[in-house]
């Protein structure tokens, strides 16, 4: 089985939305032919009707009555459908993009994930030849539509690929953001930039080494070092360490240690359980708290020694600074390195800042963005750490 999947949107990737006779032109012409005399941009006015998630003709006909009333149509439903096919069949499309998508079939699995009405599949098939795709996910057939998270979750259930092995290409940020939230690789682009699409696809297909990548998410790197009941969980800021720990180890068999909650005063003040215990332990023992960058080895040994009394539990140490270790032989148990792409980590960090600081100014946000760009250098240290782990 092929190891990776690339999913393409259709509109504005293959079918024209901004050049030649576009989808926007077709919607406006359709409505005016049906009797609408206003000047509103129809393309932007139909979102509330969710036409692309309507599953059959009977349901579409019901919605049509509301649309016809709002826009003063003079046509019957049957006439509307006939005009729809006639007008939309004129829409231009980018044959070179469709050809390129087909050319990837020997390198990976390919698929379509797009919002369509019940009248569009025939036109889609004419443009791209759906038989050449391994997977076809259309909103009206699923009864779901982008950017709702449920459509991506449904696709994930139906394909035999880990989220890190999927690349989704779409022209809209909201669609991309929803896909990214599931851990998919994503790329926001239009079909007018085929060279960039090719570059991104080639990067995704050929990126098979063990390192963290700038723009490709990968499955976690996992290596068992010793038989100790210890899980060392690391990755860049924004890689999803805390979420990974909660999803996999949030039960009585595990004790989750978060070094930020121990050593950061702000986080310590609201910490609980083992992190509060360890925070108090460090503050009682050290006048000046050790820091993770310079004193990682000391902190790691202290945590292991303190937690040794919890003999019936596996200790999970969540820390971004494992790459700061000086004596790698100190590591016990299993190492798990989240290989979330640096682009994803950076974007998550920015979104987290905005969420945690709702009253931020643009100047403050821009300053934070500049500081976080250092992640594009920091991750190289983690890749060096992976190299050192790999040879153990």
Image (cartoon, rainbow, N blue to C red):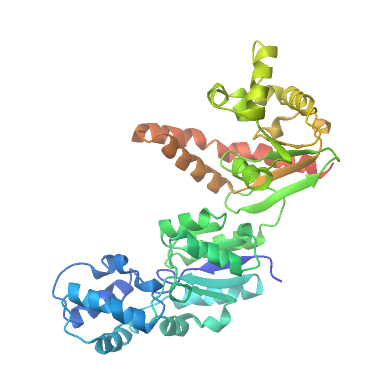
Residue 225 vertical position relative to residue 204 in the rendered view, above or below:
above
**Residue 274: x percent and y percent?**
67, 28
Residue 164 vertical position relative to residue 298 in the rendered view, above or below:
below
User: Looking at the rendering, in which quadrant would you find the N terminus?
Assistant: bottom right
Residue at 41% x, 34% y is 357
**Residue in front for this viewpoint, 127 or 30:** 30
When asked about the image quadrant of residue 254, the answer is top right
Q: Is residue 242 rendered to the left or right of residue 372? A: right
**Residue in front for this viewpoint, 203 or 351:** 351
Q: Is residue 44 rendered to the left or right of residue 239? A: left
**Residue 88: x percent and y percent?**
33, 82
Residue at 57% x, 45% y is 342
Q: Is residue 79 rendered to the left or right of residue 288? A: left
- Which residue reaches farthest left? 37
Q: Is residue 196 rendered to the left or right of residue 38? A: right
**Residue 107: x percent and y percent?**
65, 70
Residue 392 vertical position relative to residue 298 in the rendered view, above or below:
below
**Residue 119: x percent and y percent?**
38, 82
């Amino acid at each position: 089985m092929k190891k990776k999947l690339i999913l393409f949107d259709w509109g504005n990737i293959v079918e024209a939305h901004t050049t030649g006779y576009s989808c926007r032109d077709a919607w406006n012409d359709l409505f005016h032919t049906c009797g609408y005399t206003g000047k509103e941009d129809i393309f932007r006015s139909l979102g509330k009707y969710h036409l692309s998630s309507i599953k059959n003709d009977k349901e579409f006909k019901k919605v049509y009555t509301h649309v016809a009333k709002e826009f003063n149509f003079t046509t019957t439903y049957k006439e509307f459908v006939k005009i729809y096919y006639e007008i939309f069949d004129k829409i231009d499309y980018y044959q070179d993009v469709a050809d390129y998508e087909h050319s990837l079939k020997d390198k990976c699995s390919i698929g379509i994930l797009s919002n369509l009405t019940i009248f569009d599949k025939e036109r889609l098939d004419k443009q791209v030849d759906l038989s050449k795709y391994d997977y076809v996910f259309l909103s009206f057939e699923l009864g779901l539509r982008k950017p709702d998270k449920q459509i991506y979750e449904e696709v994930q259930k139906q394909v035999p690929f880990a989220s890190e092995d999927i690349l989704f290409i779409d022209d809209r940020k909201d669609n991309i953001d929803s896909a990214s939230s599931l851990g998919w690789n994503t790329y926001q682009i239009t079909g007018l930039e085929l060279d960039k699409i090719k570059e991104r696809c080639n990067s995704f297909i050929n990126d098979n080494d063990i390192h963290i990548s700038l723009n490709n998410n990968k499955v976690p790197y996992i290596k068992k070092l010793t038989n100790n009941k210890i899980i060392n969980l690391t990755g860049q800021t924004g890689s999803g360490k805390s979420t990974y720990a909660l999803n996999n180890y949030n039960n009585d068999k595990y004790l989750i240690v978060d070094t930020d909650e121990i050593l950061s005063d702000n986080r310590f003040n609201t910490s609980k359980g083992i992190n509060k215990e360890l925070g108090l332990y460090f503050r009682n023992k050290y006048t000046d708290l050790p820091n993770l960058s310079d004193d990682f080895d000391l902190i790691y040994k202290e945590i292991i020694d303190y937690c040794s009394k919890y003999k019936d539990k596996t200790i999970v140490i969540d820390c971004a600074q494992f790459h700061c270790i000086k004596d790698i032989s100190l590591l016990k148990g299993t190492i798990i390195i989240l290989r979330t792409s640096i682009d994803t980590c950076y974007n998550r960090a920015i979104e987290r800042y905005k969420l945690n600081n709702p009253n931020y100014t643009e100047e403050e946000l821009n300053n934070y963005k500049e500081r976080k760009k250092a992640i594009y250098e920091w991750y190289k240290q983690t890749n060096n750490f992976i190299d050192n782990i790999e040879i153990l």
